[in-house]
Image (tube, helix red, strand yellow):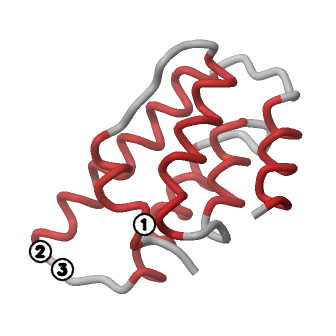
Amino acid sequence: MRPILLIITLITSFPTLSADDDFDKVCHYFEKLDSALIHKKMTATQKYDFISELVMKELNANSAARQAWEVIGYAVPDERYEIYQSTAEEILKSKWQCASIKKHISNTGK
């Protein structure tokens, strides 16, 4: 767990221009996943790939939201939402939450 916290700490030290929008975009990607799951059953890896494809395609490589997503799949499943939320709040300097991420992130990963 310590390496994840170290990486998240490093991510939070990078300046970002569109942090609000990027974290909200990741939330939106999970809303898309929620809709897709109505029509198709997916494994944890397929869910991770679904989100990752959108993140890699639509978010800048320097985006804190993208960097946090890239490491979150390696975290303990039950801790992923709290880690991602804490990272968002640290970057944004305000409260942040996403019901869709909270619903699916613990069973989305490698």
Which residue corresponds to mark 2? 39
Q: What amino acid type is highlighted by mark number 1?
A: Ser
Mark with earlier residue (2, 1): 2
Which residue corresponds to mark 3? 40
- Secondary structure state at the residue bearing disc 3: loop
Callout 2: few (<14), some (14-19), or many (20+) C-alpha neighbours within 10 Å? Answer: few
Instruction: Identify the residue at image location x=21%, y=83%.
Output: 41
| Image coordinates for residue 33, horizontal then vertical, percent | 30, 60
Q: CA distance from mark 2 to mark 1?
A: 20 Å
Which residue corresponds to mark 1? 106
Quadrant for the N terminus in the image: bottom right
Judging depth in this view, the residue of 62 and 89 nearest the camera is 89
Q: What amino acid type is highlighted by mark number 2?
A: His
Quadrant of the rendered image containing residue 46: bottom left
| Image coordinates for residue 9, horizontal then vertical, percent | 83, 39
Residue extending farthest to the top is 94
Q: In front: mark 3 or mark 1?
A: 1
| Image coordinates for residue 17, horizontal then vertical, percent | 72, 17
